[in-house]
Image: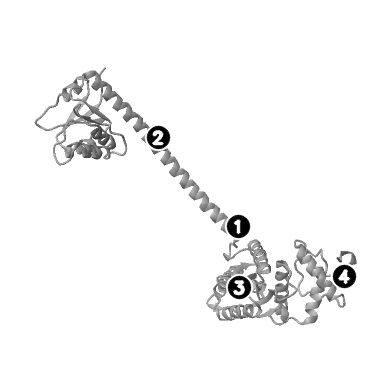
Amino acid sequence: MPLPANILVMAAEESRPPIITALEGLGCRVQTASDCLAAMGAVKGNDVDVAVLTECPGQFDLIDTARVLKGLRNDRYLPVMVVAGRELSEEQRERFGEAGIDEVIPPDAPAAVLQCRIHAALRLKSIHDQLNQVRGELEKTLARENALLKQLREDNRELKVRSVTDGLTSLYNYRYLMEWLRTEFKVSRRYGHDLSLIIVDIDHFKGINDEHGHPFGDYALKEVAVILKQCARESDLVARYAGDEFAVVCPRTGRQEVQTLARRILSVCRKHRFQHQDRRVPIMLSLGTATYREDPEVVSPELLVFLADQALYQTKRHGRNGVTAWHEIDAETRTAIRRELHGPDHPLLADDPKSRLELAAAARLIGMTSEPTSLRPSCGVVQSPPTTTDRSREP
């Protein structure tokens, strides 16, 4: 049966080894190369199915030539056969195997034996080429999957960023603010650290929108967000609390430090130039602060927000464009606000059993001697004064 295969035979120019005649008799298309360089050119430029090395003229020996030829083409497999005498030692055969030589043929091999060896080499080549093709397809599929996975991760990352940030100011949103504040509150309570909160409100923001338009109002919100980010420390978290309100959470920060930060925010905002139609528009801020541990009323993160908000409203009552700390509010007003929080089922404490117990104990000590006067209704605070103390809830 003829072998329609392209066989490269490397032999000296002046010689024509008998294997060439035998291969042609088997129907193979035979081309010759006189040395290693010529063989390399033939392998790179032609579709060679099998390389047969009869002798190795030039500076390379059979083993080096076999290694070079087999490494030329990564896209397909090249079987390499060597014509050698039967006197080969076991060591030489091992070296041939280590070099990747597929077969050793005796010089006087009969045509039937030669045909079987060529058939075996072609089958080996076919299997290797199929495996290479499958591997290539798998690599392409894996590359596509990796690209899709990378895109999915980027989309998820972007979605996560969008879910926790405010679209206008690029600050964190209220949901992330409260999650982060609850975590920091637990850390502060566990290790005894101070935790402060600043609530920031743009004064007369509705009037700014009415006079200069909503586009300028959006611009003012973004500029105030930039001011807060510039003034805050790396460990602080700045978030958009509500429409024209912002919050700055300051871990490991006491009353004095948070007051310094609040005054710096006010100073930077007063110096900032808010431009509208080539004229400066004055933008003023009102701030309120509260501090966990130094303000004994703070027994939950929600109460920290509530008391800072009450301090902010006190700033507005006293002319705006300033900062008020919760402990700076007069004692009578603070007492009245605390009494509004006497109930263990109060919404601000419903999720924290420890806070309910602490506040219940505080309520018994405070007593019920004056009317509640909350500065600013917020977070479901009861506005009507309680009539009697619920003794059934006392431990």
Name the disc covering residue 386, or none. Answer: 4
Q: Tell me the CA gap for discs 4 and 1.
A: 40 Å
Q: Is residue 317 left or right of residue 229?
A: right
Location of the N terminus by quadrant is top left
Amino acid type, residue under disc 3 in the picture: His
Name the disc covering residue 212, or none. Answer: 3
Of the numbered discs 3 and 1, the one sitting upstream in the chain is 1
Q: Where is residue 233 drawn, in percent x and y? A: 56, 73
Q: Is residue 243 left or right of residue 62?
A: right
Which residue shows up at 25% across the image and 20% down it?
113
Amino acid type, residue under disc 1 in the picture: Ser
Q: Tell me the CA gap for discs 3 and 1.
A: 31 Å
Q: Tell me the CA gap for discs 3 and 4.
A: 45 Å
Q: Is residue 241 visible?
A: no
Residue pointed to by mark 2 = 134
Residue pointed to by mark 1 = 163
Q: Where is residue 46 drawn, in percent x and y? A: 23, 34
Closer to us: mark 2 or mark 3?
A: 2
Q: Residue furthest front?
A: 90
Question: Is disc 2 in contact with disc 3, using a CB cutoff of under 8 Å?
Answer: no
